[in-house]
Structures are given as C-alpha cells and as structure tokens.
Amino acid sequence: MSDIKLLDCTLRDGGYVNDWLFGHDNMVSIFERLVDAGMEIIEVGFLDERRPFDMDRSIMPDTDSVEKIYGKLDRKQAMVVGMIDYGTCSLSHIKPAAESFLDGIRVIFKKHLREPAMRFCAELKALGYKVFAQLVSVTSYNDEEMLDLVRLANEVKPYAVSIVDTYGLLHQDNVMHYFELIDNNMDPEISIGYHAHNNFQMGYANCIAMLTKKVNDNIKRPMVIDGTIYGMGKSAGNAPLELLAMYMNQRMGTHYQISQILEAVDANITQFYQAPTWGYNMFYYLAASNDCHPNYVSYLMDKRTLSVKSINDLLGKLEGEKQLAFDKKYIEQLYIDYQKNEVNDDDACAALKKAFAGKKLLLVGPGASMKNQCAKIRHYVEAEKPTIISINHIPSDLVPDYIFLSNAKRYVQLATRLSKEKYPIIATSNVTGTTPDAFAYVLNFSTLMDKDAEFVDNSLAMMLRAMVNLGVKTVTLAGFDGYSARRANYFDSDMEYDFVKKKVEYLNTYMESFLASLKDTLEVRFLTDTRYNTEIR
C-alpha cells in the first residue's frame, strides 16, 4: 500500500549492538539487499559530529561522510535517511539536501527538548530534507504534553512524527491511545510513524495493531513502520523487518522480496548475533513459513553452500507427509537434484580449454597461508606469471584472472564486489540457477560433484575435476592448507565454518585420497604448506 511505508533502521539502531562497526562491505551489502527487497525507506546510520569518520562504521560526523560510504550505490526507489540525536550534530555539518546522498533526516529528542528540537527540524526542512520528528520515550508524555508536541508539529509540518517506544513498555491499548491522540489532532498530511522495541515481546504485535487499525478504520493519514533485519537493535531489539514484510505481503498486497532480507540475515547480521537458548530464530521462521520440520532447515543451513533464497526454494519442494517428518535421505536427494541445474556447457568448456592451453595455472584458495606465506606467493607470481584462478573468494593481495564459484552462499557474500570489479567468472550450474546468463562460463555441477562423498560439492575437488575435463596437465595450488581443529583455517575469520572443526579428519582424508586418484591424469603441485599427507608435491 503506497501510503504505508516500511523503514529499515538496522544500520542505525542495530549499531548499538556492535558500536556501529558493521564493516564497509557489510554496510554496502545490507543497503543493496534492502533496496532489492523493495524497502521504501532505509536509514543508513547516525550523524554525530563527536565521532570521527570511519569507513567501516555507520555513525558519521557529517553528510559528506554519508556520501563517502554510500554515495556510489544505486538507491532505486528507496528514500535514504540518517538520524540525529538532537544536540549531537550541528547544521554546519549538514549540507543542503540537493548536495547530499540523504533524502531525509530523523531527529530524536526527549520531551523536555521538544521546542528547540522542533525548531531544529524546521531548519533541516529549510535545507530541503524530509524531516522526521522522533518522540523518544513516548511513554513519558502525558496527554497535555503530547498535544503540545502536536501543536509544534503542525507549525513545522515535518514529513512524519513517530511514536518511539524506547524501552518497549507499550501494549496495544497504550499504542492506540497515542495513535488516536496524534491522529485526531495533527495535520492530515503529516505521516505518523511507529518505532517498537521488544522488551515485552510486543514489537511485532504492536506494529500489526497499528497496520490493522489503519486498514480497518480506513485512516487516510500516511504511516511509517520501523523494523530492523532480524530484530537487531538496542536492548531486546526491534520488530523484525522480515516478519513485517511477510505480514504486509500476505495481508496488504505488497510485494517485498523477503528472500533478500533473509540473505542479509545470513550473510551480514548473524555474525553479530550471540544465539540465546530460546527465542526468535531464523531457522524456525523458515520452518514455520514453509510448514516443515525445523531439522530440514538446520540440515540445509549446516551445508553452508546454499543462499537463503535457495533454501527457501528447496523447502518449498517438500511434499505431503515428508514436510513434517524429517527424512535425511529425502532432503539430501532434493538437495542434489536442486544443485544439478543441468546446462549445456560445451561452449564454455571449449572456450576455457583454449584459454588455458599452454598456460601455467595457479589455483588460489582462502587458506591462512595466503596471508602467512604471501611473500612466497608474490615471488612465484612475479617470476612465473601464471594465470590465476581464485576459488570462491577474492584474494586481498593478488589480482586473479578468473574467479571460480561453486558455492551459492559465497557468491551472495561476494556479489557486490563482483558486480563492480568485473572478473571473468567460471561458475558451476548450481550457483547460476537464479541468475541465468550472469557469468562468462557455466559448468555443469553434476559432472564435477562426487555423489558418493559426505560433502558432494567440495570446491577444490570440483575445480580439479574441471581441470582434468579441460585437458590441463599441471596445476599449482596456493592457500589450500587442509583443515585443523585448533588453528584458523582461513585467512579471513568470517569465512570459518563451525562444522569444519567436527569433520577435520574426514575432510583431510578425503582430499588426500582424491589427490592420489589424480596421479596419472593431473600433476598437482603445492606452492604453500598443506596438511594433506600426500606424495604429490
């Protein structure tokens, strides 16, 4: 509904959890996923002149900093806003809206500061911004004070006035009282907003109550409802954005792309989340929304190869009694069938065979040796000038000639950089199921997997099988260190998988056996140290 807008404030309110240190890549990825999800309003962080500029943090001293972090991104349909805690960012740090990446600014203020804060809102509006007046600790207002705030708002005419339940104290009768008091007295062109906190587990329920009242009572006033990805936020957190989007899709005819929000949960948000013993959890959300046993969700998530969208697609293929009765063999077969996504790769194979003919090939993995032995790798590259193929990651100290992608989850994490850095990509068909014609070369997953292995899609094994199929006789490996239960397995800690620690012996033994099987068809040389106990060196 065009007069109801969802506003995501993950990059701002979520920052209370991690001191706004999301990391630049995460900030960009979250923003782009929210845009693709169809969010009408995206809040990109705090404006606070007391904090120095940091490319990795979503708390910024001025509007120029917003431009530095987000300025090259495509906002499409989204309104982009920032937030100022009144008194922490002066007008001297705010450029006119016409010169800013921001479309709007939200101003939070306590009750006793309402008069000077509303004057500040008027000054921001004069600079061309859509201004939101955010009534912090709304439960501290009595009716007379609220009517005085409404009087001030009617003079300034901000874009929106928002009920902010800072301490999560409101129940539905309280929410409706504030809503009706404001709605009955405020200029009808001013939107009314609601920002929930979940201390009483009422955030989502109160948002639903607001939305239901607007629809049932045919209220014409525009409305803005706040949420955050996975409910990330201060104290008990916020109303989860994915739940709000789901409700509006089901009940109000909207078309938010919830899979994009779930990808952000998986790729960008869960690293900041310390899981409780119970409570709201994406596993159970996916299970409930697909009417299936939660073990199906955990089984697919534990593979760490599928995007959340792909997991959702797979869960949708469960049929009949199997939905609620977990069957490991059944879901494994569905997983393999889903991954195959058969394509005709004759042209891709012919082109790659020609491109690699007579070339020295260096296959680069994400092992810790990429950092520990970077001088050795750099010396080899300078001396031998090999064609470099990086597997499921982008190296920090090398410029690869190709990227090999066999893992859909890794692809989701790299998508923003890949779209900008334009490497030729060799992808297996399981990665390309939802992105046809997106990559330069697509190879059939089914010809590269090992259907008899516990992990059918080991990326190094798949790449080496591809080398054999392409007629390559010799390859050099760097950054394929094998696995350890005690030491870091990747140069980037964000790439670590929990399950690896439990499967170290199997993974190392499998690869040793596989390398031995290649002895007569492909010479494999290790440039960096490896734990694989193999004679092929």
Image (spheres, helix red, strand yellow):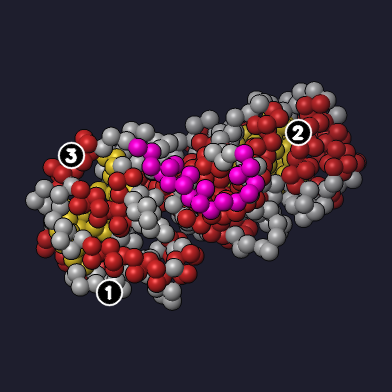
Residue 189 in the image: above or below residue 357:
above
Q: Within 10 Å of the Cα at label 1, are there few (<14), some (14-19), or many (20+) other Cα atoms?
A: some
Q: Nearer the viewer, residue 4 or 297?
A: 297
Magenta span: 320-342
Q: Nearer the viewer, residue 457 or 265?
A: 457
| Residue 533 numbered tag | 1
Depth check, mark 3 against mark 1: the one in front is 1
Magenta region includes residue 328: yes
User: Is residue 397 depicted above or below 417 in this figure?
Assistant: below
Q: Is residue 11 above or below residue 132?
A: below
* Residue plotted at (76% across, 38% down): 208
Residue 61, given in percent of the width and then of the height, sits at 54, 53
The residue that appears at 25% across and 53% down in the rendered structure is 465
Q: Describe residue 176's horizontal placement relative to residue 134 as left or right.
A: right
- In the rendered image, the quadrant that contains the C terminus is bottom left
| Mark found first going from the N terminus, 3 or 1 | 3
Asked where in the image residue 106 lies, by quadrant, the reply is: top right
Q: Which residue is found at the position 86% from the left and 29% from the top?
A: 184
Amino acid type at circle 2 is Leu
Q: Compare marks 2 and 3 and give the one earlier in the sequence.
A: 2
Numbered badge on residue 351: 3
Secondary element under disc 3, as helix, strand or loop, is helix
Q: Quadrant of the N terminus?
A: top right
Earlier along the polypeptide chain: callout 1 or callout 2? 2
